[in-house]
Amino acid sequence: MPLTPEETHVNAGDRMPPGTDPGLLRRINAVSIVQELRRKGVMTLSSLTTSTGLSRRTIEAIIDTLRADGMVEEVTEEAGPRGAGRPARGFRFVAESGALVGVQVAAHEVFAIVTDLNGAVLGKAAQDVRSTTARKGRLLALHTAIERAVSSARFPRERLRLISVGTPGIVEPSGYISSCTALPEWSDFDLGAEIAATYGCDVRVNNDTNLSAVGERWQGTSSGFDNAVWLLTGRRTSMGVIIDGRLYRGNDGAAGEIGLQGGAWDDVRDHPLSFYGATGRPEAAEANSIVEAAQRGNAAAVASIDRLALSIAQGLTGVVLSLNPGCVVLGGPLAQAGPLLLPAVERHLRPLVLKVPEIRASGLGTEATAIGAVRAALDGVDDDLTSLWLSGAESAEREPLAVAP
């Protein structure tokens, strides 16, 4: 959010508190202006004055600096019938001045999305890997996916501002993967540092299920819910948790690893449908046949799906009772069985909890983690605007701008 007018007003002619650093306040004001332009598109000087509380003279001076840096450009805005006066001067944030990359690392594929600084998709690419591929080969696939996505976006690599990665495993805030059982040789190393060494930009790493929850709330079926759970279950069970509109990672990034509880989640893993939609597994054919038979009304297949739904409901009971989410989103391959599975989950959950949340299937499919990674990258730009530099005397030290969220 932009700072309040009292915090941001730094017109050179105004009186400032003793000890105030004019350069710092000017940079804070610049961040406030850029944030407004990113949110609202083209704005005039008058509308910027109203929304930021800054004086017109202050805004004009900062706009000139931002234009020199290529972060803002002037556009001609003609509103209403043409009159005798000049068209209003409008300004827009140049979202194409930098690019973000969202990456999802999975057992059989690494997928990357490149967007501009407002989240508009510029390019995508995927690189196949095997579930047995070791660390070196998977890192090569990751770099290949990024390079191909950047190439498809026709964007200069040196203008990448932030790379956001979602990966299986317990990921510490620093980007260090402390534990991962889903991928070989994917524990005890700093994935963020590995990527940053190649691309020289800010890199953020998070658990893939966490980022799926973020992506789902941004563009998927939990949009509008401030308290939601994104559930991955089947061969692997974990969840991403949104509380009061923000991702909850826990003390060490290990929140949501509910599959380790065993019990009902072991029953889900042992169910034939746990292989539904799995890649490269012969058991997937049996799972697919159960779903197809249930769609035709086969009683045995319907009963099989009902048993799976009961196990999922039992596993969710503690989650729903403790977190009281407004929405639970089923993600991963099992989401494709949603029309058959979700009503049964809700029916079995109803007598076990006080309030039954909305039970929905993911709307983002196989791109959920990458979309969440893009949203996390956008949030990173919103939080500290590390990509923004001011030209002129104040930027001689080339300090990146930063503001508190």
Image (spheres, helix red, strand yellow):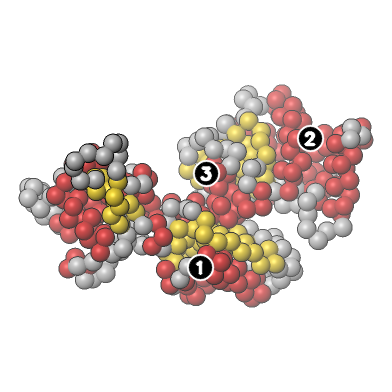
Closer to the N terminus: mark 3 or mark 2? 3
Image location of residue 329, percent across then percent down: 64, 39
Query: Which residue lies under the disc numbered 3?
Result: 218
Residue nearest the viewer, comparing 51 with 188: 51
Closer to the N terminus: mark 2 or mark 1? 1
Q: Amino acid at mark 1?
A: Arg
- Distance Cα–Cα, label 1 vs label 3: 26 Å
With 35 as the anchor, is 96 left or right in this view? Answer: right
Provide the secondary structure element on which disc 3 rests.
Answer: helix
Q: Amino acid at mark 2?
A: Leu
Q: Nearer the viewer, mark 1 or mark 3?
A: 1
Q: Quadrant of the N terminus?
A: top left
Please tell me how crowded label 2 is: few (under 14), some (14-19), or many (20+) other residues with Cα within 10 Å.
Answer: some
Query: Which residue lies under the disc numbered 2?
Result: 340
Is the Cβ of the residue at disc 3 closer than 8 Å to that at disc 2? no
Report if residue 241 is visible in the image. Answer: no
Q: Which mark is residue 2?
A: none
Q: Residue at x 84, y 41 (%)?
A: 291
Q: Residue at x 13, y 54 (%)?
A: 20
With 151 as the anchor, is 314 left or right in this view? Answer: right
Query: Which residue lies under the disc numbered 1?
Result: 154
Q: Residue at x 57, y 31 (%)?
A: 326
- Distance Cα–Cα, label 3 vs label 2: 26 Å
Q: Amino acid at mark 3?
A: Trp
Is the Cβ of the residue at disc 1 closer than 8 Å to that at disc 3? no
- Distance Cα–Cα, label 2 vs label 1: 42 Å
Report if residue 221 is visible in the image. Answer: yes
Image location of residue 361, percent across then percent down: 67, 39
Provide the secondary structure element on which disc 1 rests.
Answer: loop
Closer to the N terminus: mark 1 or mark 3? 1
In this rendering, the count of numbered labels is 3
With 211 as the anchor, is 49 left or right in this view? Answer: left
